[in-house]
Amino acid sequence: MIDILGLTGKYLHQHAVGKISSNPELAGLNTKYFERFEDVIHEEHITNQWFTPESIRSALGGLSFMLDPSKLNNWLLKYPSLPVSSSSQKTVGVVMAGNIPLVGFHDFLTVIISGHRFFGKPSSKDDKLIRIIAEILTDLHPSLANSIRFTDDYLKNADAQIATGSNNSSRYFNYYFRDIPHIIRKNRSSVAIISGDESRDELLKLGQDIFTYFGLGCRNVTKVYIPKDYDVTILLEALEDFKDLSNHNKYANNIDYQRSVYLMNRVVFLDNGAALFREAKEISSPVGVVFYEKYSELDIVREELANLKDSIQCIVTKEEGFEDSVLPGQAQSPELWDYADGIDTLKFLTDIAN
């Protein structure tokens, strides 16, 4: 299975860079799938304008990073009982989000690598990419055909459930799946803490954490903590490099709307062409807006973020002492063991087999 996933990662890397490889291992897959996969990449934005080819290729790059065999082996070392035996196999329903391309792939991967049966309901905003990847995997490993199933309807008769949605939908999921083991995820946001001595390159990497996928992912930074004497224009000037995003119609409409709201309500904000920047206590900002807050001591920020732990997906900083933090530029490249909401999905899948 790891060899097959590794080969799939090599295949997906081609689409991440937009160039077919001469690797003979991939020749058969390329003949069968490459043009069709590229067509999907270029056509997705017709039904979902947020899914630009650039965003999709970025997501595929993250997947190919995940599917490195050495990473897969290291990930599974903690779970020697996997894959589960056929007698312990369960059907695991997965309700997939659709805010960014292939955001549900990690759940798909954990279910199939655990040996359970995957029964997925993709988001209507993101159902083509995951299906073609599943088709490639079953081509390479035909026995998976009996373990992978998709539906556009309600999930019924599953033995366990993983569901990702909004804070509102989570209440429905918790009720609907109350009688079976489940993982229910809610809205989360990510934050960054800068020390004030970041280089321009580090600020540009932070910009990737903010603006990749137009800021729609739970690992996108929506708030930045800055030192109280920091000149925020330094950050804004560095992030001007991302102002081409405003050429995207839906993103530009979000900025225009928020700008109008702020002007009408006399809210103070800064505008660098890439986003609006507003000083605020909240951590989750609207699309096209980045909140910032000034701090006097890092310990105060640590205490505040500890209190907000259930609302935060990822912390981006080069400062020490922030649990599960990543360096600027790494928020959108999670490791296999960087579980959404901090819930160990493989442990959950191991436990339901017992």
Image: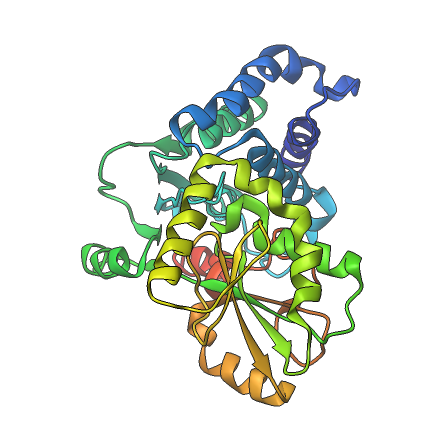
Of residues 207 and 306, the one drawn nearer to the viewer in this rendering:
207
Point 70% across, 30% down: residue: 17
Residue 100 relative to residue 265: left or right: right
Percent coordinates x, y for residue 240 in the rendering: 66, 51
**Camera sees residue 195:** yes
**Extreme residue in the top direction:** 31
Point 73% across, 74% down: residue: 196
- Quarter holding the C terminus? bottom left
Count of numbered labels shown in the rendering? 0
- Quarter holding the N terminus? top right
Of residues 216 and 232, the one drawn nearer to the viewer in this rendering:
232
Percent coordinates x, y for residue 8 in the rendering: 63, 31
Of residues 200 and 98, the one drawn nearer to the viewer in this rendering:
200
Percent coordinates x, y for residue 52 in the rendering: 53, 32
**Camera sees residue 329:** no
Point 42% across, 61% down: residue: 351
Residue 104 relative to residue 21: left or right: left
Percent coordinates x, y for residue 16 in the rendering: 66, 32
Residue 171 relative to residue 212: left or right: left
Q: Quadrant of residue 352?
A: bottom left
Position of residue 105 relative to residue 315, above or below, is above
